[in-house]
Image: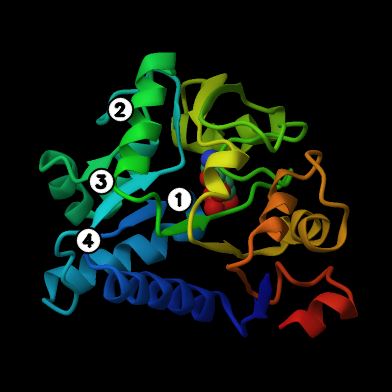
Amino acid sequence: MRVIRESSREAVDRAVFEEFCAALRRRPAGVIGLATGGTFSAFFARIAQAVAAGELEMGEVRATHLDEYLGFDHDQRGGMVHELTSLCPPLRQMLDEDRFWPVPASGDAGAVQEHEQRLAEVGGVDIQFLGIGRNGHIGFNEPGTSFDLGFHRVHLAPTTRADARDRFAPDEPPYEAVTAGPKSILKARRIVLSAVGAAKAPAVRAMLEGPIDPQCPASCVRYHADSVVYLDPEAAAELGESAAAMS
Ligand code: GLP
């Protein structure tokens, strides 16, 4: 795993966008695994802008993503597919053309199996983007999740629901979701995790300097041979010298 300490949040956004462009160049008909959340909002806006300006061609690429709230429709406010397609109209078009494959929000075993099979049949995910939760989660894999789990249904942790409160207000955030498990995430050929802001500093430290343990789900990314972590100064603030040396 490489850890890259960028000089600013904008530099992280640039690096992540470059990763995306490089993945498109490497395999124009490949599969991109997207992540949601504030960490990636500038990234999606940038993709949309580049496509609209004719600077970026999505070509034959396929997209999928990490997680969805249980039972959510693609157009449901607060949902992950709604977030992705609203922030990035090219993804809306890909969804309409069946080139963006959402996580089956029903959590139904058959649908989940079909989704995993579809990804496997096209050669798996080429690059998986990841954020990290304050509690060290990736996707919706909350602390304590076995690294052996594939796609599965989850109960959201109180911190996760608290962080999701704004996107659902005045309604309550959901209690359950469907997520790619650590096992599915680690199958991607390359993993790009990014974290920005001081709220993520303790989770980043646990991920990089703590034990590789389900108590910090993001620590499983250290098992992956081709993984890179981009941090802004605030998210890297609690790292010791060893992580600095990894840069
Ligand atoms: C949600 C998503 C995660 C994401 C995390 C961080 O919980 N399920 O995939 O990484 O939020 O979100 P943010 O970037 O808004 O901090």
Task: Please state if 127 lies on the left or on the right of 5 as rendered.
Answer: left
Q: For the residue carrying disc 2, how many other residues have a C-alpha within 10 Å: few (<14), some (14-19), or many (20+)? A: few
Instruction: Give the percent coordinates (x, y) of residue 139.
Output: 55, 41
Tag on residue 29? 4
Q: Which residue is mark 2?
A: 76
Q: Nearer the viewer, residue 246 or 136?
A: 246
Instruction: Classify the position of the C terminus by image quarter.
Output: bottom right
Q: Which residue is mark 3?
A: 85
Q: Label 3 is placed on what type of residue?
A: Thr
Instruction: Give the percent coordinates (x, y) of residue 175.
Output: 57, 19
Q: Distance from label 1 to label 4 (Cα)?
A: 19 Å
State whether residue 72 appears in this view.
yes
Per the image, label 2 sits on a secondary structure element best described as: loop
Q: Label 2 is placed on what type of residue?
A: Gln
Q: Is the CB atom of the residue marked by disc 1 within 8 angstroms of ligand 1's nearest atom? A: yes
| For marks 1 and 3 on the same chain, the one whose residue lies earlier in the sequence | 1
Asked whether the beta carbons under mark 2 and mark 3 sit within 8 Å of each other, the answer is no
